Amino acid sequence: MAIGKIHPACKQYLWGGEKLIRKYGISSPNTPLAEAWVLSAHSDGDSRISFSEEELCSEGKESSEGEVCSEGKESSEGKVCSEGKESSEGESFSEEESSSEGESFAEYLKYHPEAVGSFGKAFPFFPTLIKLIDAKKALSIQVHPDDSFALSREGQYGKTEMWIVLEREEGAFLYFGFQKDYTEEEIRRAIEAENFPSLLCKVMVEPGDVFFIPAGTVHAIGAGILLAEVQQNSNLTYRVYDYGRKDAQGNTRELHVEKALEVMNRKQLSAYRQEAFKKQGKKPVGEKAAGEKAAGESATGENIYLEQIGSCEYFTVDRLFLEENAFYSGKLTEESFLSLLVLEGEGVLTVETKHAKEKHPDGSPEYKEETYSSKGQKSKCFVKKGESYFLPAEEGQWSLKGTGKFLLTFLSEKNCVRED
């Protein structure tokens, strides 16, 4: 199995900043850069995917001892060294060179539906969309409809999402739900009087905070927040309040008050918040398949921390912490793809499968079942902050050696249960 590198679709909005380019290595001609859609098959922002058959994306080769030698090689200390960017430890690292931005992710899935996995058969579409969002200025106060309303009124699906706060400026906050129960008329009057924000819960944020936002929840990302967003594959937003701002042409942005009033939850709502991850002693984890509990055993478990931070109908999300160049190994299955987003740090991603690819006499491929060995397929890739990777659903295993924070998104059995 080759490793799929995702090339994001980039969005320029009036509230965006420069951090995604400057700190996360997102390549974009657009400034300010508001959003990078780092896993998307949506027509409004289709990512692109490219595969490398090289053992190491930076053109390194693996020695018999398992170390990566030559340019892009892994040193005896486990660091990937070469010409290129300097790491926090003072060593330099090579960047992947790509002469092509690959193919449309949506087109790839169209011709390779098995890459989503058997759990994905519950959906008529790729269910998940992942973004990096840099809010230099506050976003509009908005709400997303649920599937029932969106399908009946808009001909598309609604939107449930979750946020993982990565950075924040001093005093940064977001809006999340109402402080108390309100009637539709009370809300309408507040919008007309331009004091709608006074009705909402104002939530101060810290890096590591996680918020789950069900469809129908009024919300807004405040100024000075950079976060990762995992969401349902939808781009349907009803803007309620936009602070009277004007775009570059001097026009105010469209509001969708009537539809928003129809879909919003007007009840008092406490934030669906998980506090920032705090280490309470060591929490070792072992080999883990998507959706399974950790085995609780690993050779370097003292430096590995794994937590599930969200799960709903459209996605399940784990957050993985690796310290001191730790090694983590997990299973791949035919049930689900695995998305890996590097939130911080760097490492070497390795994927091995049981299937050896052969050719029929007519030239079409077949897959021969094998144990994990040289007869199967093996790929390696150096990964760093801001990069996104897609591992298609297939029996195998993956591993990551490095130091950093990583977001793992996949489908679990829970995601297969649909009511529609």
Image: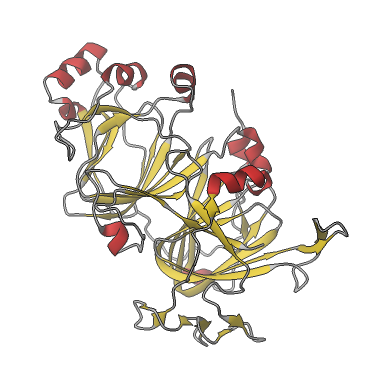
Quarter of the image holding residue 192?
top left
Relative depth, front residue between 51 and 167: 51
Quarter of the image holding residue 44?
top left
* Above or below 280: residue 217: above
Residue 50 x, y percent position in the rendering? 55, 59
Residue 281 x, y percent position in the rendering? 43, 65
* Above or below 19: residue 90: below
Q: Residue furthest right?
A: 361
What's the residue at 52%, 42% (across, down)? 315
Q: Residue furthest top?
A: 185
What is the quadrant of the C terminus in the image?
Answer: top right
The reply to whether residue 47 is visible in this rendering is yes
- Judge from the rendering whether residue 96 lies leftward or rightward of residue 226; answer left or right: right
Relative depth, front residue between 187 and 310: 187
Quarter of the image holding residue 63?
bottom right
Relative depth, front residue between 285 and 32: 32
What is the quadrant of the N terminus in the image?
Answer: bottom right
